[in-house]
Amino acid sequence: MAYDTPPSYSTRPTLRVDLPTVRANYEALKAKVGAAKIGASVKADAYGLGSVAVGKALYGAGCRIFFVATAGEGKILRDAIGPNGAIYVLNGPAPRDRGVLLGAKLKPVINSMEQARYWYSVAQDVNEPPYTAIHIDTGMNRLGLTMDEVTELGRDKKIWKILNPEWVMSHLACAPDADHPMNKQQLATFRKAAAQLPITPLSLANTAGIYLGKPYHFQMVRPGIGLYGGKATTKPEQEVSQTAVTLLAPILQIRYIKAGETVGYDATFTAPRDMRIAVVGAGYADGVPVNASNRGTAILHDMEMPIIGRVSMDLTILDVSEARLGVEVGGVVVFRGDQLEAEAEKLGTINYELLTRLGQRLRRDYYVKPPKEAEDRR
Ligand SMILES: *Cc1c(COP(=O)(O)O)cnc(C)c1O
């Protein structure tokens, strides 16, 4: 994704979101799972890309099932996609969210008998209560019913009927590593649990789970990171999705410093020689982690430029001494793009965190395919 120096620029950083690529990733993952449905994970503002634009784009591509974490996220998505389309709230129902869940027709994921009993009490009182999904814990010990609770729920016809589950789901702990023994264990536990419940469509796989193959697909898969082009497995070369997001920041000032001068808060960087440095307009409030201080890089004209000094709230400083092409105020540097996974590894974090930390202040620039004519003229 080339991005030329703009003739006029803003001091505000931009997140360029390539919606045609999000759609293409959806199609590519869909092609991998055959008849299984796709339930798109758009929690955390669609991993920082913006759930309104991403939700609409996926809806336009035919996606009719979405997963968010909270009722508030669900309400925002409901307003974006309109009255049709199922929106599941992964964290489940809670008393304070009752009004939003019912008002926006959100479907709670039931993660415990406590949540089951709570939602039973709500659903009994309302006309046409929304359907639910039942989440079983198969070994991750995060959310989900224990095996004992599955047995209990399986016997309770009355509560099952009122909860009206459309899906029974679980979540994989170690799917990125296809050889991890826990994958098969969880698959077996999931089958055993499902056998104790009335026959219901099943869902187990996130993005990485899709690459574990057909036995893991069941009737629905729930990709998140793969829709946005983040790599999900230890074998990224097998993955079908492309990067859909780039964080761009403008150069605000260029300075020439002498050997021995320091840079930034706490003077954590001392220039080993005379240097040319660039101050760019994106900081930790925008999603450049403090952890990238004196470690991370940004791309300028296809070359990696080291981040020097401590990343500050709104600004980051780069050593651009080695840049060969023009370095000028208003020029654009790239913080996230194809190098997302490499950057995450270097910073001791994961691509998911780099995406979801993308700040609210970013101008989100939604790239939509240029009209056919414009394309032909190129
Ligand atoms: C976040 C989440 C997903 C999506 O995971 P990815 O690794 O981003 O594909 C699926 N299911 C559950 C329960 C989740 O919490």
Image (spheres, grey):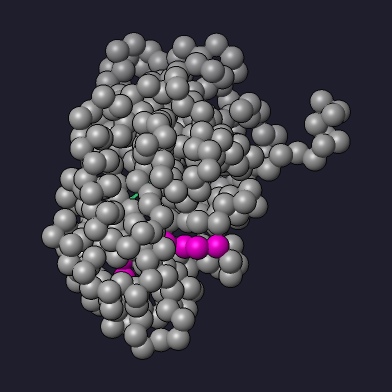
At x 51% / y 28%, what residue is drawn? 240
| 37 shown above or below 346 | below
Q: Quadrant of residue 8?
A: top right
At x 57% / y 52%, what residue is drawn? 63
Is residue 86 within the magenta segment? Answer: yes
Q: How many marks?
A: 0
At x 41% / y 86%, what residue is drawn? 126
Report the predominant secondary structure element of the magenta stretch. loop
Q: Nearer the viewer, residue 34 or 10?
A: 34
Q: Horizontal and vertical percent for residue 54?
A: 55, 50
Q: Is residue 135 visible?
A: yes
| 92 shown above or below 182 | below
As drawn, which residue projects farthest toward the bottom? 125
Q: Nearer the viewer, residue 248 or 99?
A: 99
Q: Quadrant of residue 331?
A: top right
| 70 shown above or below 308 | below
Q: Quadrant of residue 70?
A: bottom left
Provide the residue span drawn in magenta: 85-94
Is residue 93 within the magenta segment? Answer: yes
Q: Horizontal and vertical percent for residue 3?
A: 63, 29
**Quadrant where the image shows the C terminus:** top right
Q: Is residue 295 visible?
A: no
Q: Horizontal and vertical percent for residue 80?
A: 58, 63
